[in-house]
Image: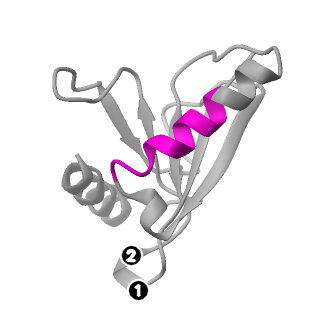
Amino acid sequence: LEPFIVDTIRELWNRHQPTGSAFSLYHGEVNEEDDGPVEVCVPTADGDKQLPAGDVAFTIATGDQCRFPEIIGAYDAVAGWVKESGRELAGSPREIYHSDPDAGEEARVEIAWPIR
């Protein structure tokens, strides 16, 4: 999955003029049996899709926390906070990439999950 995401971001970044951080939307589980689907995106001024506004719960993972399977802990932390707060998960979680590995930056990924 990681090579697919990295390669797709590079391709989109080179074809478009991004206006912010690249991100992925997970429309289904990704594990040994399920492959999502996963949507890889870069925001652009003339984009053809707009994500709905709303509340999200989020956390930031850095360094080795961004790698699988450690990143699952970030998802679990968000889901746990949502449940403890009496809210519900509502939609596809997002991984927002706030670093550039090609520039040697330490990985920094925001896990943002829509809630209601």
Q: Is residue 45 shown above or below 89? A: below
Quick one: SS at disc 2?
Answer: helix
x, y percentage for residue 35? 22, 26
Assess whether residue 6 is covered by the magenta stretch.
no
Q: Mark 1 = which residue? A: 104
In which quadrant will I find the N terminus?
top left
Q: Is residue 17 visible?
A: no
Horizontally, residue 60 falls left or right of residue 99, namely right
Label annotation for residue 40 = none
Q: Residues within 10 Å of mark 2 (few under 14, many from 20)?
A: few
Residue at coordinates 37% horizontally, 57% vertically from top-left?
67
Q: Quadrant of residue 15?
A: bottom left
What numbered label is drawn on residue 101? Answer: 2
Q: Main secondary structure of the magenta part?
A: helix
Residue bounds of the magenta highlight:
68-79
Disc 2 marks which amino acid? Pro
Quadrant of the image containing the C terminus = top right
Q: As shown in the figure, which amino acid type bears the numbered disc 1?
A: Gly
* Above or below 60: residue 36: above
